[in-house]
Amino acid sequence: MRVVEKRQILSAEEIDRTLQRVAHEIVEKSGGTKNLALIGVRRRGVPLSQRLARTIFGFSKVDIPVGTLDITLYRDDLSTVASQPVVQSTEISFPVDGRDLVVVDDVLYTGRTIRAAMNGLFDLGRPQRVRLCVLIDRGHRELPIEASFIGQTVQTSDTEIVEVRLREIDNEERVMLVDRVS
Amino acid sequence: MLQHFEDLLGIETLTREQITFILDQSKPFQEFQRHPLKKLATLRGKTVALAFFEPSTRTRISFATAAARLGADTMNLQAESSSLKKGESLLDTVRTLEAMRPDGIVIRHSSSGAADFVAERLETPVLNAGDGTHEHPTQGLLDALTIRDRLGKLDGLSVTILGDILHSRVARSNIHLLSKFGARITLCGPAMWIPRQLESLAPNVRRVTRVEEALKDADVIIVLRVQTERIHEPALAAEEYILGYQLTRERLRLARKGAPVLHPGPMIRGLEIDPDVADGPQSCVLEQVTNGLAVRMALLYHLVGGAPADAPHPAKERSNAAD
Amino acid sequence: MLLIKGARVIDPASRTDAAQDILLDGGRISKVGADASANFKENDTEVFDAKGLIVAPGFIDLHCHLREPGQEMSETIETGTRAASRGGFTAVCCMPNTQPVNDSASVTRGIVERAAAHASVRVWPIGAASVGSKGEALAEIAAMKEAGIVGVSDDGKPVATARLMRQVMDYCRSLDLPVIDHCEDPTLFAGGVMREGAASIRLGLKGIPAQSESICAGRDVELALLTEARLHIAHMSTRGALEYVRFAKKQGLRVTCEVTPHHFTLTDEDVRYDSRFKMNPPLASREDRDALIEGLADGSVDAIATDHAPHHPASKDVEFDRAPFGITGFETALSLGLSELVHKNKISLTRLVELFTTGPARVLGIERKIAAGQAADLTIFSADHAWTFRAAESASRSRNTPFDGRAFRGAPMATIVAGRIVYCRESAARAS
C-alpha cells in the first residue's frame, strides 16, 4: 500500500521539546516520583518511555523503573488476521502490584491497543493506578480510553495515518501525517 | 521474520530458519510462565482436539495446559476410553474428530506416519505429539530451547545421545534438529539398539558402544528412557544396562564441565541415570518441562490462531499502520 | 476365423522376430507366415490389423490372487481376469490363500468351474502345500492335481518347516508338480512392514532384513539338492536369494524364480506413509533391485509374475503399520517391463517376451509358442503407445497400486484367448 506525505506534525526538535514537557507533567501530576514506573508499549512506546525516564532522572535524580510490554497476545483482532503476528517479549522486571504506572505509546487512535496493554498489565499483578501517556492523540476512539499526558492532539480523517519515526528504530526523527493512496 | 505453518509433523522437513523462528517465538511464552495470572484470551473461542492414542500423561497435560493458558478449549480423546480399542480405525476416529470441527488437532499415536496420515486427510492444522518411532517434534524443539538457553548457542555442538536410539522418536527428532545446526552427534547404547543405518539420518553422526568414549568432551548429553514396556529389542536386564550405560557422576565427569544433561522423562532414577545426576546442577529436566509448555504455546498460537482458511474476509479494522 | 495381419511376431520358442500373419481357427493357430492370409474367405474371417504392433505367445502370470472364494469384496475371478486380460495375460495362476484355502479338490473344482463360467482368461489354480496352509499336515495334492492345480504353495507364508518342505518336495516330485515357496523367516520378519535399511530407519517403520528371504531361499535350495524336486522361488526380491538360485541352476537342479514388476521398478527409498507402497516381500534396496535386473537380463530369473494382490480400498486406507500387504499389478506389468527394462536397454524385447511366455511355461512344464496346432492364445502389444494408467479406470475391484497416474510408453493392445479377442484397447479397435 502506498502513502503520500501531507504535512509534518513534529520535527526532531519539537519531539524533543514535547517529551521534555510531558516528562515534567508526569512528575508534577503524580506528586513526585514515588512508586512511579513507566511501561513502554512495543514498538515505539519503548524508546519513548526510555527517553522520558532519562529526562525524569535528569531533573529529579530518581531512576524510574521502565518496562516493555508486548501486546500481541492481548489483541482483540487475532482471530481475524490471516497469519499470526510475531510475538515479542514483555520485560517487566519489577513487581506491578501497587505501582503507579504510566503506559507510554506513540499514537492513541481507537484505544484497542491500550485496552490490550491493560489486559497484559493486569495479568502481571494489580497496579495501584494506570495512566496513559502518548506522543500524539489522533482521535477516533472506539473504546472509553483517555490519555492523561498528551504530546500533541491532531485532527485526522480515516484515510490518514500518523507516522512516527524515532531514531532508535527508524534512523530518523519526525512525525508526519500521511494519506493512504489506493 | 514471519513463518507460516500449516502443520507440525516433524523436524526433518523444517529449515534452520523455521526452527529458529519457533525457538525465538517460544521466549515470550517462557516469560509468560512467570506471570502470576497465566491466562490469555488469545485463542479464546478456538478448540484444540487432543487425540492421544497412546498412554501419555506428561505430554498430554503439557498440551492441555498450553491450550488452556492461551484461552482455548480442548477436546480430549484418550485411547483407553475411545472406540479405537474396539477396532475403529484411525481414519474413522479422525473423521469423527473432523465432524466436531476443532481448530487444531494434537495427535500422539503408536504408528509411525499417523500424524502425516491425519494431516493429509484433514484441513485442520495437525501437531504431531509423537508418532510411533518416527518423530516427536515438540520434544526436539523444547530440548533445543533448553540447550540454547544453557549454552547460549545451538551451533556446532558435540551432542551425545544415550539409550535405545532405534526405537526412539525423541532421538530422531533431536538428531534431525541438532544436525541442522551443525552438531556432531554421537549415538551410544548396546549394539542392537544403535544399528548402522542410523548414521544415514544426518551428516556427522557416529555410533559408539562404549559409554566412556561417547561421553568424552560432550557439550550436551541426552539420556533416553529405558522403557519398561516391551519396546526394546532385545530387552536387556536392568543390571546389564546399568553396568554398560547408566549415566553416573564419574561418567558425567568425562564430558565438558557443566554440560547440560537432558532427559525426555519420566526418568527411572537408578536405571538409565544416577539419582545424583538426575537431581544435580547439570540436569535440565525441570527447565525442559517449562520449555515444553512455552514451545507448545508458541506452536498452538501460530498454528491454531488466526482466521480459519475459509473465513470471510473481515471488514478492514481501523489501524494506524501503513500495512 | 481370425486373421492377424501385419504384425511383428516375436516367438522365443522358434527364435522368431519377423513380420508374419497368423490365422486362427476354432481356438487353435491354423497358419503362421506369409501365406497365412492366402485363400481366406472374406466374409467368415475377422481381420485384426496389427500393423505397428507386436504379437507374442499369450502371456502367463505365474502368481496372482483372485480372492475368490471368500474375499469377493476385494476381487472376483471375473473382475481379476478382466484386469488380467487388459494386461495382456491369457492365463493366470491363482494362489490358494482364499477363504477357504484351496487345499482340497472340491475347492479347486469350485474355482475351475467358476472360471469356466466367468473368467476372461485361463485360470490355472495353485493348490496349498499344507492343510489350510497351516504348515502341519500335507494337503491332498494328488486329488487337487486331478481337479486342475498346476503347482503347490502356501503363499502368503513360507512352507513352515524344513521337514514339511522336504515332504512336500518329495511328494510333488513324484506328481511332477512345481513347489512354489514364498521365502521368509518368520522370526526375522517379526512384525516388520518394509525392507530394513536407511529408509525404514528414517520413517520409523519396522524393518525386515533381506536375510529373512535369503535364509529361507537357501533352505529351499538345499532341500532341492536333497530331493531333486522342481522348486520355484516366488516374488524374489533379494540378491541373496538370487545367488542361491544361480548356485542351484549351476548344479543342474530344476530351480526357477520370478520377479515382480514393482520389485524391478521401485526401491525402499520410494516408500512413504502410503499403504500403496506396502507389500510382501517389501520394496527392495537399490542394490538388490539392480541385482534383480541383472538376473532378468542374464537368464538367472525365469519369469516376471505380478503377484496381483487386490485389497478393498477401505482396508488399505489405514495407517501404514495396520494396512494389509499387497498391490495390484495386472494392468501395469507389461508397460513397466517395457519402460524399466527394454526402453532403458537392460534387456531386449525378445527377452522381455520370454519372461512373460516361455519362462513361465517352463516353470509349469508346458509349451508356449506360436505354431500351427497350438492353442490360439496371443498377446498383442505396442512398444510405443503412450498412455497413462489410472487406478480409477482399472478393471480390478481394488485400487491399491503405487502406479496411479503414471505415464507409460508401451501397452497391451489386444489379448486373444482360445481364438477369441477378450480385450482390445479402444484405439486399436479395428474391425474388418
Image: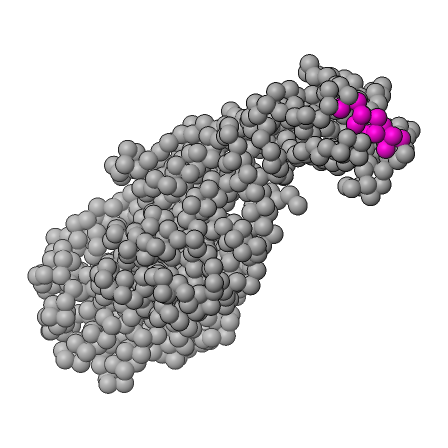
Q: C93 or C29, which lies in front?
A: C93
**Segment colored magenta:** A14-27
Please give the name of the residue rendered at 35% of the width and 71% of the height, measured from the top-left corner.
Answer: B210
**Residue C219 lies within the magenta run:** no
Image location (x, y in percent) of residue B252: 39, 63
Identify the image quadrant of residue C256: bottom left
Image location (x, y in percent) of residue B155: 57, 60
Please give the name of the residue rendered at 47% of the width and 51% of the height, measured from the top-left corner.
Answer: B143
**Residue A22 lies within the magenta run:** yes
Instruction: Give left or right: position of A79 versus C360.
Output: right
* Residue A64 visible here: yes
Q: Would you place residue C18 above or below residue A8 in this image?
A: below
Instruction: Give left or right: position of C97 versus C281.
Output: left
Give the residue at the far top of this rendering.
A144
Instruction: Give left or right: position of C106 versus B128.
Output: left
Q: Would you place residue B230 above or below residue B59 in this image?
A: below
